[in-house]
Amino acid sequence: MNLKSEPIPFALPSIGKEEEEAVLRVLRSGWLTTGAEAREFEKEFSSYVGSRHSLAVNSATAGLHLCLEGLGVKKGDRVITTPYTFTATAEVIRYLGADPLFVDIDPETFNLDPASVIRVLKCEKGVKGLLPVHIGGRPAAMEELIRIKEERDIFLVEDAAHAFPLVYRDKFLGTWGDAGVYSFYATKTITTGEGGMVATDNSELARRISTMRLHGIDREIWDRYTSKEASWMYRVVEAGYKYNMPDILAAIGREQLKKAEMFFRKRKKIAEFYQRTLGELDFLHTPSSGGENAWHLYMVRLKTDKLSIGRDTFVKLLQAAGIGTSVHYIPLHIMPYYKDKYGYKPEDFPNTMKVFKSVFSLPIYPGMSEEQCVRVSDTVKNIGEAHYRGIH
Ligand SMILES: Cc1ncc(COP(=O)(O)O)c(C=O)c1O
């Protein structure tokens, strides 16, 4: 087999013997749903990120929904977030009948721009909280956003779906605000296939989430069946959801957590390699590899005025050469749902549109070989040079 011509996938989970054995252990244990594994995963996660509580859920979407519900978001409320994200970030606001209030991004970091947040807060009413995203793993401007949260006395929930396990200024991303939500979706920095974790120091919020993630029952199913005082008695105190993480997934998560630091080092090394090989190219903006980043995504921007082809053709040519590529993200305000519901126009968020038109993401995952990294960067270079038209 000629490995050179083998396609390089855009993303690939790193699953080893340890995860396989952990799943078998659970399958043979007779307890498949939420139980001891999920509980251990939560404890281990809390001691890893330094949060008082961790709550395992079946997706980050579920975790975000639970956080907003627990913080009291209601119909008619507004939550500030970025249009430059995946729809999960904003849809959870709609689940509660509230409205996302999109604010433009900083074109350098692709994250919520605090100066624009301040401007919007001066003229908009009904804002209950901030929901920043650490896009691709790059930290949002947390100091400024926390200052705004405190001055305004509103909540801040971090969408940390891309941000594990980055320590930013001595604190894990996801532990800065009232709560942080991590994703363990198949392409994320650690994975359970589907899954997520909420981290919070707020005990009242943790209690509410713990009830709401399992049908609004005030005790976990695990307690009912396995604790010393096990009984058939339970009380439904709310119309809750079915958002608990099963032990099969939690067992995978525990093994992935042990490898998180090693995965991170490998992704960082790939980012440094891309920076060395692509950083000087005249037709490309690369993210600074010196800056802090969890490197879930390696997002680059084409300087389209230097090329005779646009981003879409560039990505097609990469794919034709067997390099898995993706575009993160198609802005939410141009998606039919948000556009029709709120009457947004593309030009309402100029920085978001500017970034979207030229951005694409290259493969970056621990299982990539050196040869694959070289092939990715050589192919980018070759396509760019073949369509280079210099300064116009
Ligand atoms: C920024 C962002 N937030 C939230 C989510 C939702 O994550 P999950 O698939 O675990 O629900 C995603 C998923 O890709 C995401 O990219």
Image (spheres, rainbow, N blue to C red):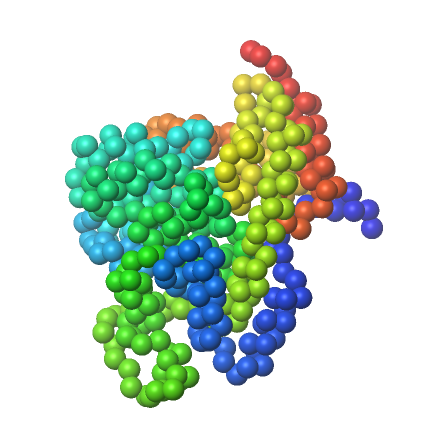
- In the rendered image, residue 203, in percent from the top left (x then y), is placed at 29, 62
Residue 351 shows in the view: yes
Q: Farthest residue toward the front?
A: 170
In the displayed structure image, the side of residue 268 where residue 132 appears, left or right:
left
Residue 79 shows in the view: no
- In the rendered image, residue 26, in percent from the top left (x then y), is placed at 55, 76
Q: Is residue 67 above or below residue 111?
A: below
Q: Farthest residue toward the right?
A: 1
Q: Residue at x 26, y 38 (%)?
A: 148
Instruction: Locate the C terminus by quadrant.
Output: top right
Q: How many marks?
A: 0
Q: Nearer the viewer, residue 338 or 152?
A: 152
Q: Is residue 192 above or below residue 146?
A: below
Q: Nearer the viewer, residue 19 or 170?
A: 170
- In the rendered image, residue 135, in percent from the top left (x then y), is placed at 45, 41
Residue 61 lies in quadrant: bottom left
Q: Nearer the viewer, residue 23 or 349?
A: 23
Q: Residue at x 63, y 66 (%)?
A: 18
Q: Farthest residue toward the top?
A: 392
Q: Residue at x 40, y 39 (%)?
A: 140
In the displayed structure image, the side of residue 13 where residue 331 appears, left or right:
left
Residue 279 lies in quadrant: top right
Q: Is residue 105 above or below residue 183?
A: above
In the displayed structure image, the side of residue 242 where residue 35 appears, left or right:
right
- In the rendered image, residue 196, in percent from the top left (x then y), is placed at 44, 59
Q: Residue at x 20, y 40 (%)?
A: 152
